[in-house]
Image: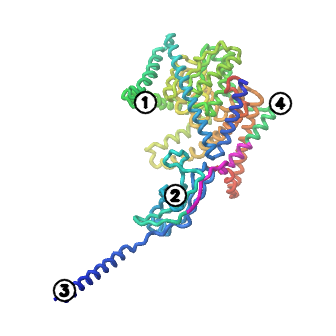
Amino acid sequence: MKKEIPLFIVFITGLFMAVQFFVPHAKSEWVYEYMLDWTIIIGVFALALGIWSFVRVATNKIRRKSENWQYSIVALAGLFGMIIFGLGFWGGVESYMFRNFFNFVMVPLHATMFSLLAFFIASAAFRAFRAHSLLASVLLLSAIIIMIRFNPFLGPLSEPIDSLASWILNFPNMAAKRAIVIGIGLGMVATALKVILGIERTYLGGD
Amino acid sequence: MRMKLFLFVLLALFMTAVVVAQEDTEIDSVVTVSPPAPVANLVGVDTPNDNGHSISLSWELSPDDATLGGTVTKYVIMRSESADGPFIVRDTVAAGMTKKADNGVKEIEAEDYFARNTDFYYKLVALAGDLKSESEVFGPVRGVGQWFNTGKWSVVAAVGLFTLVTLFFIRRAKSGAKLYIRPLAGIDAVDEAIGRATEMGKPILYVLGLGTASDIATIASFTILSRVAKKVAEYQTSILVPCYDPIVMTIAQETVKTSYYDAGRPDAYNEDDVFFVTNQQFAYVGAVNGLMIREKPATNFYLGKFYAESLIMAETGSASGAIQIAGTDEVTQIPFFVVACDYTLIGEELYAASAYLGREPVLLGTLKGQDYGKAMVIASILIGIGAALVGWTGYVDLFYVGP
C-alpha cells in the first residue's frame, strides 16, 4: 500500500492534467488552478524544510570546523539578517536595511557571478574551436562567420557575410535545433506516460 | 403720433424677426454636417474553444470609415445586459477593424469580470470627431465554456498514436521480445565515473538543475539519481546533491535514501548529503562552484533543467579535473555542456537514460516507442515535402493547432 496509493494518486492527477489540456471549460480551469494552489502551499511548507536543511548543514560545518567553515557563518548571518530586516517591526521589505542589503550586496554579487560567464565562454570557445577534425573545422568556420558578421570594418564584405551567417543560423542550425526539440517532445510524452502508468516509479524512491 | 409709434414698433419687430430668421438659417446651414453612417450587420457569437468568458463580435465597416476615405476614426464597443441599456464601454477599436473579441476574466470581484451563461446585448458607436452614430443593438448572445478544444484535434491524434505505439512496445517487451537499443556513451560512462570516484576516495556531485519538481527534465533526473545513488551505495562511495528547490530537495532525499536501502546500505545514508542551498540562480552557482573547489568531487553529474549557470558550473568542474556527465532538454544550454563536459546527453537522451541504466524490459519498450515516434515524425516531414511540391496545402492544415 505504501507504493500503491501514491501511484494511484499520480495516475489520477496525471490523467486529469493530460485531459485538462484539451478542456477549456471554466470548471476544468478551476480544478487545475486549485491543484496549482496546492503546489504553492506544499512549496511553502517545503521551504521551511529547505531552510532547516540549510541551517543544519551550515551549523554542522561550523561545529566540525570543516574547510572554509567561516563562510557558513556569513551564510547564516545573511539568512537571519535578511529575515530580521524584512520583518514588520524593522519596516518590512521596504526598510532601509533590507533594501540596501538587497540592492548593494545581493544584486552586485549575482551580477558578479553572471559576469563570470563571459570569461567561461571565452575559455570554452578556445577549447571547442580547434580544427582537430573535419567536423571541428566546420564548426570553427561557422563560428568565425557568425562572429565576424558584427565586425563594423568589413566594408563591402559586410552584406555577403551577413547573408551567409543568416543562412547558417536559419537553415543548418535551425534544422538541428528543431530535430532536438522534436526528440525532446517525444521524450517528454514517453516519460509522462511512464510516470502516469506507473512504469517509472524511481521518483518514489527505489525501483 | 400714436399711430406712428405703433408703426415704428411694428416695423422694428418685423426687422428683428427677419434678422433672427436669417441668423437661424445661417446656423442651420452650418450644422447641416451629418453624423457618420453606422456600422452594419453587427453580429456576436460565443468565442469557440474557450472558458466561456468571451464573445466574438464582427461587423461591416461604416461607409464613412477612415480606411475607406471617410471620417470615422474609431469604434466603441458597448455592452449591456438589456436591449434597452444602460450600455457600458467595453473596448475601442481603430478604423478598418471588422472584428474583435470582448474578453473578460472569470473572477467576480475583478473589474473586468465577464459573466458566463448571461445574455448580453452589443452595439457599436462609430466616432468621427465629435460626431457619432450608433449601430443597431445585437443580442442576446451568451458566452458558454466548451468541454473540448476542437483546435487541438491534431494533438490528440498525435499523442494518441504515439501512446499506442509505446504501449505496443511495452507489451512486446513484457512478452519477452528482445529489443535492440543503440548504446549511449554518456550512460555507459556512468559506471566508470562512479568507479573512478571510489578509487580516488572522492565524492560524486549530482546537480539536479534549476527545475522544479513538476518539470519533466527534473523528474527524469530523479530516476537517474535513483540509479546512480544505488550504485554509489554499492560502491561505498559518497554522493553530494545540492538542491535549488526545497520540494526537489525533499524528493531527492527520499530517492537517495531509498536507493541506499535497496542497495542494502541504509547505514551509509547521510541526510546532509542532499541539502538545500538557495533558490537564487547565481547564489546557487556560487555554492556549487565552491563545493567543487573545496570537495574536489571525482565525478560531476549535471542532469535536469539548466539555464545561464550551465557553463559556469561545467567550466569550474572541468578545471577541477572531474569527469563530467551532463544532460538537459534546454536546447540553448546543450552546446555549453558539449564543450565543457566529457559526456553529454542531448535532448531526449536525458529521458532515455533511466531506462538505459535500469535495463528493465518495460522501460526499454518506451525507448522503442520513442524511436518509432521519431520515425513517424520523419515520415510526416517527408510527406509534407512531397505535398508542398505538388501544391497540396491541405496536408499542412492537418497539423494545425488552435489557440
Same subunit: marks 3 and 4: yes
| Residue B314 visible (yes or no) | no
- Give the image location of residue A168, x and y in percent: 57, 44
Q: Amino acid at mark 2?
A: Ser
Query: Viewer-proximal residue, B244 or B137?
Result: B137
**Mark 2 or 3, closer to the camera:** 3
Give the residue number, with chain letter if any, for mark 3. B5
* Residue at screen point 39% across, 31% down: A94
Magenta-tinted stretch:
B138-161
Q: Where is mark 4, residue-wise?
A: B176
Q: In the image, residue B173 lies at what x, y percent? A: 80, 32
Give the numbered dot on residue A107: 1
Instruction: Decide: is B63 above or below B142.
Output: below
Query: What is the C-alpha distance between the residues marked 2 and 1?
Result: 50 Å
Query: Residue A138, percent across and down?
Result: 59, 38
Decide: few, some or many residues near mark 1? Use Cα within 10 Å; few <14, some 14-19, many ≥20: few
Which residue is disc 2 drawn over? B80
Circles 4 and 1, Cβ within 8 Å, touching? The answer is no
Q: CA distance from mark 3 to mark 4?
A: 129 Å
The answer to which image quadrant residue B58 occupies is bottom right
